[in-house]
Amino acid sequence: MLIEYKKVSIFQEDVCVLKDIDFHVDEGEFIYIIGKVGSGKSSLLKTTYCELDIESADEAMVLGRDVTEIRRREIPALRKEMGIIFQDFQLLHDRTVKKNLQFVLKSTGWKDKKVIDERIDEVLDLVGMLAKKDKMPHELSGGEQQRIAIARAILNKPKVIIADEPTGNLDPETAAYIVSVLKQISQTGTAIVMTTHNIPMLDKFPGIVYRCKDGSMQDVTNDYNKMDLTEEGEES
């Protein structure tokens, strides 16, 4: 089990946004987390990479570590085993795509230039961006920047990718392409956990579905497609 939460409660500024939730992620799983703005989706993701502390839990394990007791100096090692994708891309705008990816690999201990260059080409080819490796981020569209963000997230062959609204700012066609890439990555064994408001995507690329609502989180995989899609669509 990559992530195992039992009776976890999550707080934001002393307000409990999710109470006594159970949540687990295993190898190769493709997981959506849906719910209205403020329902705790992003807060949940932040606890997995220790940007937000868990103050109450029966169990909270992430990649073999108890995140309720993890020390600050141990967090970088945890994050190296994860890929994290943000809605706003967070690329370094003063360097090319290739140098963005070089920066990540060198900062995580890669030293051989030939091996680094081969890995960069490999991940860029996977996301269809090999021809753009010498471009600056501002020369790319939003969808292209998100593809680079995915390439960056998979550089170190992570066990799990955490993606917070990775298609939130993208047009429907580009969003579908991004999710298809993530789905493809999950089939190699890397688990994907992503928040989304794009409910129709759940039918196109099926996965496990959790819904955050009224302070709780439920597995709605078996009945999510029976929801009122108009209501869910209005959440964005």
Image (cartoon, grey):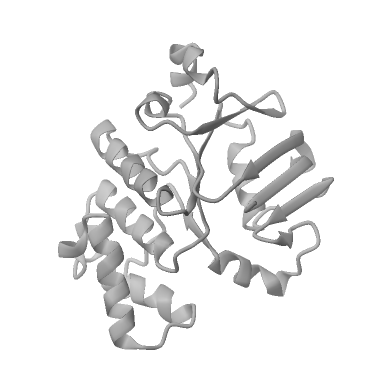
The image quadrant where one finds the C terminus is: top left
Residue pictured at 33% horizontal, 80% vertical: 116
Q: How many labels does the image show?
A: 0
In the picture as drawn, the residue positioned furthest to the left comes out as: 131
Residue pictured at 55% horizontal, 26% vertical: 221
**Residue 86 in the image, given as x and y percentages of width and height:** 45, 51
For the question of whether residue 96 can be seen, the reply is: no
**Residue 122 in the image, given as x and y percentages of width and height:** 27, 67
Residue pictured at 27% horizontal, 57% vertical: 126
Residue pictured at 77% horizontal, 37% vertical: 15
**Residue 60 in the image, given as x and y percentages of width and height:** 75, 51
138, above or below 10, in the image: below
> Which quadrant of the view contains residue 152?
bottom left
71, above or below 46, in the image: below
Give the left or right position of residue 22, taking residue 45 as reference.
Answer: right
Give the left or right position of residue 20, taking residue 181 as reference.
Answer: right
For the question of whether residue 165 can be seen, the reply is: yes
In the picture as drawn, the residue positioned furthest to the bottom comes out as: 112
**Residue 94 in the image, given as x and y percentages of width and height:** 31, 71
Give the left or right position of residue 10, taking residue 136 as reference.
Answer: right
50, above or below 45, in the image: below
